[in-house]
Structure formats: structure tokens, C-alpha cells
Image: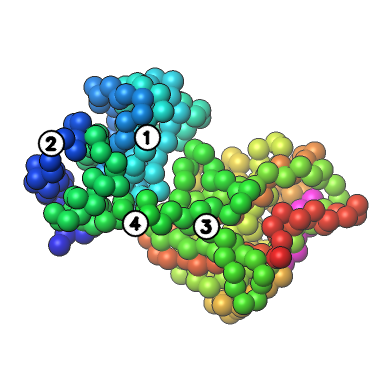
């Protein structure tokens, strides 16, 4: 059986058409195949008007390539939907997704990278010309169900599969990955299945992270004045780094970190580097993040992997040293960041005991117990 790494667009369409033709006609409202060139800015009008209450499953395949590099990005990260011109944008956590239509409207599709969203209705924060930097395409199947989508997918799976997309969507529906309570994924990067609450022998409660050719930025709101001697404390057990080389270039920018966001839009992210010396600080090499994010290396190399460490950073001092200028008034969020999109390797980490300590006391963000 072909998997998603070898499946061609022609095979994708032919095999799905073959399976769908064997379903009872009363199970389906309609099906449609839509191609989305990667070098076209959003949005693609499908010509499909959806009704409120109906169930839709989408399957997508294809790659977007950054010209002049070996970097590519798959449909699971690239493919976004919108219902209606003012509808809120959304995507699934995999190259397949099943959803109910809340409000009737026209279905629009998009390939996102190298753009970045500026609004929840799909406006871009990047110039249109950035799409000239990429090539490739996505092929999308839209299935409109008359039956319960779980029932329909099970029937399809009994007939066969296409690159494990069907069984993968059944698994996603039956075994959803639930984010830790109180934490949410950054909306303009989209959801993921990277973080989950877990229990480990060393801690009563922890957040476990596993990343593989994906990206996720998990956030929790914080209201805390940034004053001298404000410190971030946490414990982490780094099992596996998603990069074996220094992470300060775009093609190698894969890492796991914990970050603090300030009310001026800046953030500092602390991470464990494969090679860079402890104390290294640099601006993010991703063009759309360079102006806002600063990376600081606090551990380096393979020594200590698999062990738990308790960390503490003076946020006020680090802001003055690594970002500079007047310190912002407040801390507004804590982030957990996982990136393995560029080199496609795996990374594993666990976090616990996240909180702040100030001269006025302590603030727990995620505690053990």
C-alpha cells in the first residue's frame, strides 16, 4: 500500500473515486476534488455552498516547496478552510478533518505557507509576493455526508484505504488528543496533537510533548507585572532533541522550548540546543517571527537528556540583556513551543512545576499535584 510519502495526486484521486463509488448513494450528498496551487495566495473559491448542520470530511495530500532549498511542508500543516467570506478560518490536526457546518455558506480553501494570518477570517499579515517563493500543490477531496461521518468512514475503511488517510481519520475521531486544561494552541498556526497532560514517575502531574514533522505553540494566559527579580521557574525532562545541529538557521530551526510573552508583543523563549553554547541569544530566523521572538540557550548537548532538571530565569534581567530597551510593563502569556517541521525529526519533552516567583510571592501556571 502507498503511504503519504509516495502517493501521487493521480493515485490519490483514482483510489478515492474507486472506494467512494462503492458506497451506497444514500450515504453521500456529494464529493468533489479541488486542486490548490501553492504559489497562489488564499483563498480558493470551491463553488460549493454548504448547509448548516451537514457533516464534511476533507482529505488532503501534496507538498509545498520553498524555492532554492530542500524544505517542504505537507498538507497537514498547509491546508486551511473557511465557510463564507467572513467565516473563521480553521484546519485539522492531520491531513484529514471532519467537521459540522455551523452556519451555511460558500466553502473556501487555502494553502497557507509562506503566508501568515493576520485575522481570524483569513486576511494575510504577509505581502502577496511571498507566494512567489514557493512551488507545489495540494489535492483535496471534500466528502459531504448524508450519514454519520463515523459510520461513513468505517464503511470506506472496509473497502480499502488511501495512504492510511481513512484509518487515520477514524483514529483521530475515536482517540482525540486533548490539550492540557487551560492551555490553547496559537490560533494562526493552528491546532496540533503535540501536547497532552500526563503522569510520570518523577512528577504527580506533567505536560508531555511529542513532535514529528509538525509545529505547535501552546499558550496559557498570565497577568503578572514585570518587575526586577521576576523569575520564571519550571522543571523539564528532555528526552530527545528534534535537531542534531545548531538551530539558528531557517533549515535547522527545530527545537523544544518554554517562552514568556510580554505586553509589547515581544517574547523570550528558553531552549535546550544540540550544539550552541549556553548563553547564546539570537533573533528567530523565521522571517515572520524575527521582529518578535528571541531565543536563549540554557542547556546544550546530549549530556542530561532523559533526566529532570529544575530551572529558573530572571525574566527582567534577560529582557534587558537579550532584547534591550525599556522593559515592558507586564507578562501576558507562557508558551510551550515545539518545532520539528524543517528537518522532520522527532522530539520528546516533559514539563512540570511551571510558575513565576517575584518579591511579592509566587504564581503557579502549571503545578505538580
Tell me which residue sits at (56%, 77%) in the image: 306
Q: CA–CA distance between discs 3 and 2?
A: 39 Å
Which image quadrant: the C terminus?
A: bottom right
Q: How many marks?
A: 4
How far apart are the two marked residues, 2 and 1, measured between alpha carbons?
20 Å
Q: Of callouts 2 and 1, which one flags the residue occurring earlier in the amino acid sequence?
A: 2
Give the answer, above or below, for where 203 lies relative to 101. Answer: below
Secondary structure beneath label 3: strand
Above or below, 324 relative to 32: below
Q: Is residue 27 left or right of 265 when viewed as pictured? A: left
**Quadrant, the N terminus:** bottom left
Mark 2–mark 4 distance (CA, rounded to whole Å): 25 Å
Other residues around mark 3 within 10 Å, as few (<14) / some (14–19) / many (≥20): many
Side of 332 relative to 287 (left or right) = right
Q: Marks 3 and 2: which is nearer the front?
A: 2
Per the image, is 117 magenta?
no
Distance in Å between CA atoms under marks 1 and 4: 18 Å
Q: Is residue 302 above or below residue 297?
A: below
How crowded pointer 1 is (Cα within 10 Å; few <14, some 14-19, many 20+) is rated as few
N-terminal of the two: label 3 or label 4? Answer: 4
Amino acid at each position: 500500500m502507498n503511504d503519504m510519502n509516495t502517493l501521487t495526486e493521480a493515485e490519490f484521486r483514482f483510489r478515492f473515486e474507486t472506494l467512494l463509488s462503492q458506497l451506497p448513494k444514500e450515504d453521500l450528498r456529494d464529493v468533489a476534488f479541488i486542486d490548490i496551487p501553492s504559489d497562489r495566495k488564499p483563498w480558493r473559491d470551491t463553488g460549493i455552498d454548504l448547509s448548516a448542520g451537514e457533516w464534511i470530511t476533507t482529505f488532503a495530500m501534496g507538498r509545498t516547496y520553498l524555492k532554492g532549498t530542500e524544505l517542504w511542508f505537507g498538507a497537514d500543516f498547509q491546508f486551511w478552510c473557511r465557510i463564507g467570506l467572513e467565516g473563521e478560518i480553521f484546519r485539522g490536526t492531520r491531513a484529514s478533518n471532519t467537521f459540522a457546518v455551523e452556519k451555511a455558506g460558500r466553502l473556501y480553501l487555502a494553502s497557507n505557507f509562506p503566508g501568515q494570518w493576520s485575522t481570524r477570517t483569513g486576511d494575510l499579515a504577509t505581502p502577496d509576493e511571498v507566494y512567489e517563493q514557493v512551488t507545489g500543490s495540494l489535492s483535496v477531496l471534500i466528502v459531504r455526508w448524508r450519514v454519520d461521518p463515523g459510520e461513513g468512514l468505517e464503511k470506506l475503511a472496509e473497502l480499502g484505504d488511501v495512504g492510511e488517510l481513512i484509518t487515520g481519520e477514524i483514529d483521530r475521531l475515536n482517540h482525540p488528543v486533548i490539550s492540557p486544561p487551560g492551555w490553547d494552541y496559537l490560533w494562526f498556526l493552528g491546532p496540533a496533537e503535540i501536547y497532552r497532560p500526563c503522569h510520570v514517575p518523577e512528577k504527580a502531574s506533567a505536560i508531555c510533548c511529542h513532535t514529528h514533522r509538525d509545529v505547535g505553540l501552546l499558550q496559557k494566559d498570565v497577568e503578572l507585572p514585570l518587575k526586577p527579580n521576576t523569575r520564571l521557574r519550571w522543571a523539564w525532562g528532555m528526552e530527545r532533541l528534534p535537531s542534531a545541529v545548531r538551530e539558528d538557521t531557517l533549515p535547522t530551526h527545530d527545537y523544544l522550548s518554554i517562552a514568556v510573552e510580554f505586553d509589547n508583543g515581544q517574547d523570550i523563549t528558553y531552549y535546550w540546543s544540540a550544539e550552541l553554547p549556553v548563553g547564546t541569544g539570537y533573533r528567530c530566523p523565521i522571517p515572520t517571527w524575527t521582529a518578535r521572538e528571541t531565543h536563549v540557550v540554557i542547556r546544550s548537548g546530549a549530556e542530561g537528556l532523559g533526566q529532570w532538571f529544575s530551572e529558573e530565569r530572571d525574566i527582567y534581567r534577560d529582557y534587558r540583556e537579550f532584547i534591550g530597551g525599556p522593559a515592558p510593563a507586564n507578562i501576558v502569556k507562557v508558551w510551550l513551543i515545539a518545532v520539528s517541521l524543517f528537518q522532520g525529526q522527532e522530539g520528546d519533552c516533559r514539563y512540570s512545576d511551571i510558575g513565576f516567583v517575584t518579591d511579592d510571592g509566587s504564581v503557579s501556571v502549571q503545578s505538580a499535584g
